[in-house]
Structure formats: structure tokens, C-alpha cells
Image (cartoon, rainbow, N blue to C red):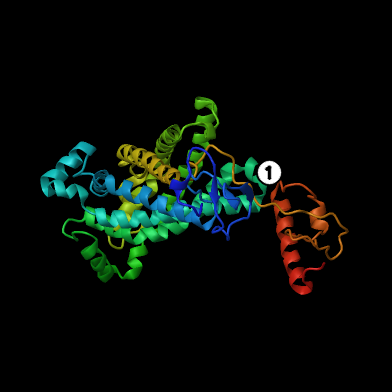
């Protein structure tokens, strides 16, 4: 950031700003003499037209991704509350809610227009918390696993990096979502249980205890982890394919509006796949949260295998496809707004590499440079100078790094 007000220079090109002796604290660059014979000092002020960018994979980067996740998940799930309400009732009471159209008709007749948004508060809070953890931790775990695997392995098996990162993030996100999801399902499917979050949460705690809020966490994992793995991995691959096969232009050469359009399209396609993969577990979650003391066996007996996979599926495909496309659009729009690139369509983040030293397989030889150092042992002779390509090589690297850390604690850095 420049220390000078922006009205002193043009945003179209850099200018030389002449300052008198009063600019004593600035770099002393003599530009000559003025008409009075007094030396003047000058500094070069660069254009500040561009917004100050956030460094990739910095704390500010992860904070921005977390905030984008809050907006993308919280707002979109709240917006589709009417669809979610009909879907949950079709899963719980198929005799009464026979189809999408009849479901809306029954709700409108019994509860009026306001009934379509029943449970929107726990939906907003729950999915905002889930979105924060899901997107924030996904970016973190994706970078972490890329670093652990190494550049060559991470690039070759990038789909596994996406799957592992999204699954790890979703496990954390579902713990944040579970209490609000339990309240939401009760409010939406049990008439007279509660009006919303303020009275529904205390009532649920009184009836089933605090642990009852997390009763559905395992089925929630069963629904959300496959959903999120498909959501992130398929999105990354679909977006990459769209840039390569359809647009046939490098992502950084496309306009921001086109990049956001690709995000929405890729998100919608990924959402359809997500709905199919996670739908059986979604039926289980709705059944368990609605019936007190119900088990998975009870759900299987009541719904049947075919009903578990198909009941409410068309509506969920419509809802999740639209939802996921909108989520990726909002998330990437927020990233663009704060100066970050959109998601997907580029290579994985380059992991931090560690220089492997070739030395005798003795105790260790420690590098005296200020760079990171690694013990040289017989483990490293198997992969000297190369990225690990299989599990055994990765384990050798891990063992080597641990040994190096122990030796450094024992003997310290040697010059």
C-alpha cells in the first residue's frame, strides 16, 4: 500500500512524485535541482489499481474460504426450505405426501404460506456452521495432503487428494450441523412440536437430553460424507474437463464472469451425482430424527430397500442439483470478490519440497544451510531425488523425517 494519498498520482501508470526535504524518512533518491538550486528527493509510486491480494494458503486465505462457505451453504439451504420441507414429509409420511405437487398442496392447505418456511432458522444456523467447516477445512486438508504426498504423487492421484480432503472436512462439518438438523427435522415433520429453534431446541434437550442432539450423527456422516466427496471431487474434475474439452482455453485467460458460469454449471452436474449417492442415508436421517428411539433396523423394515434408495429421490435431485450449483457460484463469487481465484481448473497447490541429501547411511548428515534439512539414511537411498510413488516410499519418507527430528533435538543444528 502506498503511503501517499491516491489523488497525488494516476491509477493508469506510475508517476514520479517530487517531495522536498520534508520527505526525510523516505528513500533518498536525488533527482536533480529545482529552480532555486535546492536538491529534491523523489520516490516512485506504483499504481494501486488492483485490490491487495490475499496470499494463497495463508491464514487470511482460509478465513476467506470459511466466510465464503458460510454464505454459500447457509443462504442456499435456507432458500430451498420449502423443497426440503416437502421432501422430509414425503420420507416420513408417504401416504399423506404422495408426490411433490400434492405435498405442496397439503402444506398450503394445513399450514398456509408461512408453513413453507417452517424450520428456516435452524436450517440457516446449522448449514452456515457446516459450510464454514466444509469449505474451510477442505482447502486446508487439500493442501496438507498434497504436501504429504509430494508433487508428483499428488498430481498423479489428485482425485484421491480431493476425496480425502473433502471426507476429512465433512466429518468435522457434520458435528457442527447435527444439533440444528435434529431440531429442523422435528419442527418440519411433527406438527405441534415447536414453532422454531427458540422453543424446539430446549424441548428436544428436555425430552432426549443433550446427547439426543447428536443421535443422528452417524447416519449424517453416512449421508454427508459420500455427498461431499462426490461434490468436491466431481466438481474439480468436471470443471477441469470443461476448460479442456468445451471452452478449450486456459482458466486464467477467461473472464471472471465465464469462470463463475463454469463454476455454476460444474456445481449443478456434481449436485445431481451427489443426490443419487447420498439419498439412502438421507432417508435414514429423516426417519431416525423423526421417530423417538428408532433404529436403523426399524428404518430398513419400514422403508424397505427400494424405498430407501428411491423415496423422494426426484425432488432431491432437483433440490441438490440447484443447491450445489448455487453454492459453488456463491462461494467462487465471494472468492473473486476478495481477490482469490475460482475453484478448480488448475493444478494442485505445489507442495513444499524437502531436499534429500546423498550421504552414507550412517547416523545422519545435517545440512547447515538455512533451508529445511532431512536425515540421510538407507530409507532415502530408495527414493533419492525422486517423489514417492507408492505407500512404502511415503512411509520411508515419514520414518526418515521422524528420525531427523529426533536427531535434531538430541544434537542440534551443526554448522
Q: Is residue 389 left or right of residue 104?
A: right
Q: Position of residue 281 (x, y in %)?
A: 39, 49
Q: Position of residue 253 (x, y in %)?
A: 53, 31
Q: Is residue 177 left or right of residue 412?
A: left
Is any atom of residue 170 visible in this view? no
> Residue at image x 54%, y 41%?
14
Task: Give the camera-side residue of 291 and 68.
Answer: 68
Look at the picture and state if 360 lies above or below 318.
Answer: below
Is any atom of residue 335 visible in this view? yes
Identity of the residue furthest to the right in this view: 360
Task: Give the camera-side residue of 304 and 41.
Answer: 41
The local secondary structure at tag 1 comes to helix
Total number of numbered discs in the rendering: 1
> Residue at image x 19%, y 47%?
116
Q: Is residue 226 left or right of residue 78?
A: right
Identity of the residue furthest to the bottom in this view: 410
Task: Give the camera-side residue of 353 and 341.
Answer: 341
Q: Is residue 230 left or right of residue 393?
A: left
Identity of the residue furthest to the front in this view: 36
Q: Position of residue 406 (x, y in %)?
A: 74, 69
Quarter of the picture holding the C terminus: bottom right
Q: Position of residue 16 (x, y in %)?
A: 56, 44
Q: Residues within 10 Å of mark 1 (few under 14, many from 20)?
A: some
Q: Residue 308's image quarter?
A: top left
Name the residue beneath numbered marker 1.
Answer: 152
Amino acid at each position: 500500500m502506498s503511503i501517499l494519498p491516491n489523488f497525488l498520482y494516476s491509477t493508469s501508470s506510475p508517476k514520479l512524485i517530487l517531495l522536498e526535504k520534508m520527505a526525510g524518512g523516505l528513500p533518498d533518491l536525488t533527482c536533480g535541482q529545482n529552480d532555486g538550486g535546492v536538491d529534491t528527493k523523489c520516490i516512485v509510486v506504483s499504481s494501486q489499481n488492483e485490490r491487495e491480494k490475499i496470499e494463497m494458503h495463508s491464514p487470511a486465505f482460509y478465513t476467506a474460504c470459511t466466510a465464503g462457505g458460510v454464505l454459500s451453504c447457509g443462504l442456499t439451504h435456507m432458500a430451498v426450505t420449502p423443497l426440503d420441507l416437502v421432501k422430509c414429509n414425503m420420507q416420513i409420511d408417504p401416504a399423506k405426501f404422495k408426490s411433490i405437487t400434492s405435498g405442496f398442496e397439503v402444506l398450503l392447505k394445513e399450514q398456509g404460506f408461512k408453513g413453507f418456511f417452517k424450520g428456516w432458522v435452524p436450517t440457516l444456523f446449522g448449514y452456515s456452521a457446516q459450510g464454514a467447516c466444509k469449505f474451510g477445512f477442505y482447502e486446508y486438508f487439500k493442501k496438507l495432503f498434497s504436501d504429504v504426498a509430494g508433487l508428483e504423487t499428488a498430481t498423479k492421484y489428485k482425485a484421491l487428494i480431493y476425496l480425502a480432503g473433502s471426507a476429512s472436512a465433512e466429518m468435522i462439518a457434520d458435528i457442527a450441523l447435527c444439533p440444528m438438523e435434529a431440531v429442523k427435522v422435528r419442527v418440519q415433520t411433527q406438527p405441534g412440536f415447536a414453532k422454531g429453534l427458540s422453543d424446539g431446541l430446549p424441548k428436544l434437550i428436555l425430552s432426549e437430553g443433550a446427547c439426543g442432539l447428536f443421535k443422528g450423527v452417524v447416519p449424517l456422516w453416512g449421508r454427508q460424507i459420500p455427498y461431499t466427496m462426490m461434490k468436491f471431487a466431481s466438481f474439480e474434475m468436471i470443471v477441469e474437463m470443461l476448460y479442456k474439452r468445451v471452452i478449450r482455453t486456459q482458466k486464467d485467460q477467461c473472464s471472471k464472469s465465464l469462470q463463475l458460469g463454469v463454476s455454476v454449471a460444474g456445481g449443478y452436474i456434481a449436485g445431481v451425482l451427489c443426490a443419487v449417492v447420498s439419498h439412502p442415508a438421507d432417508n435414514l436421517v429423516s426417519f431416525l430424527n423423526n421417530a423417538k428411539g428408532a433404529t436403523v433396523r426399524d428404518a430398513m423394515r419400514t422403508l424397505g430397500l427400494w424405498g430407501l434408495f428411491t423415496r423422494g429421490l426426484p425432488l432431491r435431485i432437483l433440490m441438490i442439483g440447484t443447491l450445489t450449483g448455487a453454492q459453488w457460484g456463491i462461494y467462487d463469487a465471494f472468492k473473486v470478490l476478495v481477490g482469490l481465484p475460482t475453484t478448480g481448473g488448475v493444478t494442485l497447490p505445489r507442495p513444499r519440497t524437502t531436499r534429500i541429501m546423498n550421504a552414507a547411511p550412517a547416523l545422519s548428515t545435517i545440512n547447515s544451510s538455512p533451508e529445511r534439512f532431512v536425515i540421510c539414511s538407507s530409507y532415502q537411498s530408495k527414493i533419492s531425488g525422486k517423489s514417492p510413488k507408492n505407500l512404502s516410499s511415503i512411509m520411508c519418507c515419514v520414518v526418515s523425517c521422524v528420525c531427523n527430528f529426533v536427531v535434531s533435538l538430541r544434537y542440534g543444528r551443526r554448522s
